Image (cartoon, rainbow, N blue to C red):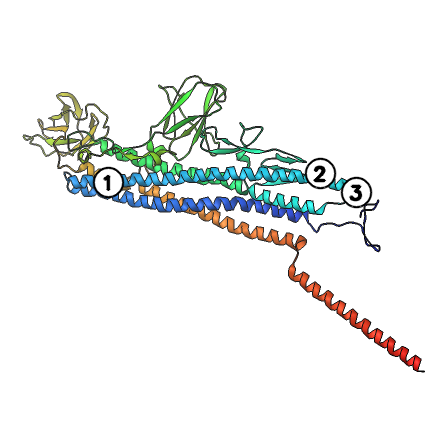
Amino acid sequence: MPQANGSFMIGAGVEIAGITRAVNQVANNQLISSQSVLGQLNSLQGYTNQIDNVVGTTAGGLTTALQNYYSAWSTLATDPTSTASRQALIGAAQAVATSFQTTSGQLQGLNTSINSGITADVTQINSLSSSIASLNQQISAATAGQGGQAPNALLDQRDAALSSLSQLVGVSTTNNSDGSVNVYIGNGQPLVLDSSTTQLTTVANQFNATQLEVSTATNGNNPISSQITSGDLGGLLAARSQAVDPTLNQIGQIATAFASSANAQQNQGMDLNGQLGANLFSIGSPQAIASSNNTGTASASVGISNVGALTSNDYVLSYTGGAYSLTNAATGAAVPFTGTGSSASPITADGLSITLSGAPANGDQFLIQPTVAAAGSIGVALTNPSQIAAAGAVQTSAGDTNTGSATISSGTVVDATNPNLLATTTIQFTSPTTYSINGAGSYAYTSGSNITLNGWQVQISGTPAAGDNFTVQSNAGGTGDNRNALASAAEQTLGVLSNGTVSINGATSALVTSVGSLAQQVNTAQTAQTAVNTQATANVQSISGVDLNEEAANLVQLQQAYQASAQAFQIGNSTFTTFMQAVNAG
């Protein structure tokens, strides 16, 4: 029982001044830190490996689907009127759309899983912080009641709770004079102060209600997600911001470029009905999402003005001090733009065109997402095989009475939206070096140079004679023409992204490679951190742990010592007995 001086007495002859724990706080802190980093990497690794599997399987399938799609155009070019080939092309187009949709759906499923993980982690963190606060209270009371003697069992329980907490979220601690500890997370956010706790909660992202953020129960409108970078919770948040969402944007960028280029080429051709080609694919528009914190009445709409300049970034458009600014949503870096946002002068940046209406309030924000939903929304718009535009939209011919040696190219469409694209146009040479168009004007002739009018472009080469004429007109009825089918097949290697330097196939291959590289980097980091954590655990165990083999060896030694002492006593007793017998006999 405790004496007045705080010491302890066992029996009547042994007094214990106190019991101290075999613990090294530096080693414990190193273990807690290593556990937080490992927890983050374990969580991140799980998702990057899943993304690698998703992209490697479905995007790998997308590569095959794209190859089949372009091959279907080549097959159609050999027989432009074949209904079977046209139907096969529509099927190939559907396979491409399905591959995009599948990849997007699986990635969105990972985001749903991340939300569930965040909710579970927050619940566990709240439970552990409450347990630590309760133990703080008990430790303070026990320390005071035992004359300053540390309540070792309670301290061990608290260390175990802190260890479990560090696996969920990075923590730092400070010690109080009464034996309690304060626990902080993030950039100094208090979680436990003595015996009180700050409960965490989940709140909807201000731009996307389907994504959860972490906040405190008392300050839900200001999430602290960006401050949480370690532990399982940090890994979940990193998986979403560094892996899932960027991959969704990249696959969406590819889908947008693919649909845009395919539709543009289809629009430049003519179908079996003598009509300009309609869009082959449908795809969702870029998103402009107002923050839930906005107080003004402004709204934003966004379109794509230049697919080649399109990036896989998201952007934040902010209204502050009477002016708009545009930043990269991931990095916060300023993005240069032109325009004011009006319909007459839209904000243009990175291939986007943003139009604003209504009255913004200071601090209002919009999240601009050009591509995140594109892969999930792509579909095939045509079901009638006759609407496939395999033929060129215009045809050219030379006059039957021409006497010069000049020839005219077949003609290409440069602006399918020009209302006069299919109007018949006559180019007549008034001399070997000049020509008129529909009987008007006088234009200098240079062999092989471009002649552009009404959305089409031709080249006349050679030496014309005065009176020679050439005609550009609608190709309606040219059912055997395969020029647009050939052009569509050639899109396989056509640069459409990164300002015309990267093809669809190239972008898909690059996506597979980048996702695999990220997964490998995380795997390597996780392996290294596992080794660090193993060493930190060994350091703590060498100080505080119990080695059963060592203790068993010590017991054997004690047992042998006891047996040796008993033997010595027996020998002494025998010697004394013999001595006494000799004395008595004398």
Q: Residue furthest right?
A: 586
In which quarter of the view is residue 72 placed? top left
The three-letter amino acid code for the residue at tag 2 is: Asn
Query: Closest to the observer: 404 or 106?
Result: 106
Q: Residue furthest top?
A: 359
Residue 196 pos. (x, y %): 65, 34
Query: CA–CA distance between discs 3 and 1?
Result: 83 Å
Residue position marked by numbered label 1 in the rendering: 91
In the shown orientation, is residue 200 left or right of residue 71?
A: right
Query: Closest to the observer: 448 or 104?
Result: 104
Residue 406 pos. (x, y %): 12, 33
Query: CA–CA distance between discs 3 and 2?
Result: 17 Å
**Quadrant in which the C terminus is drawn:** bottom right
**Any part of residue 502 in sight:** no
Where disc 1 sits, the SS reads: helix
Residue 417 pos. (x, y %): 24, 26
Query: CA–CA distance between discs 1 and 2?
Result: 71 Å
Residue position marked by numbered label 2 in the rendering: 176
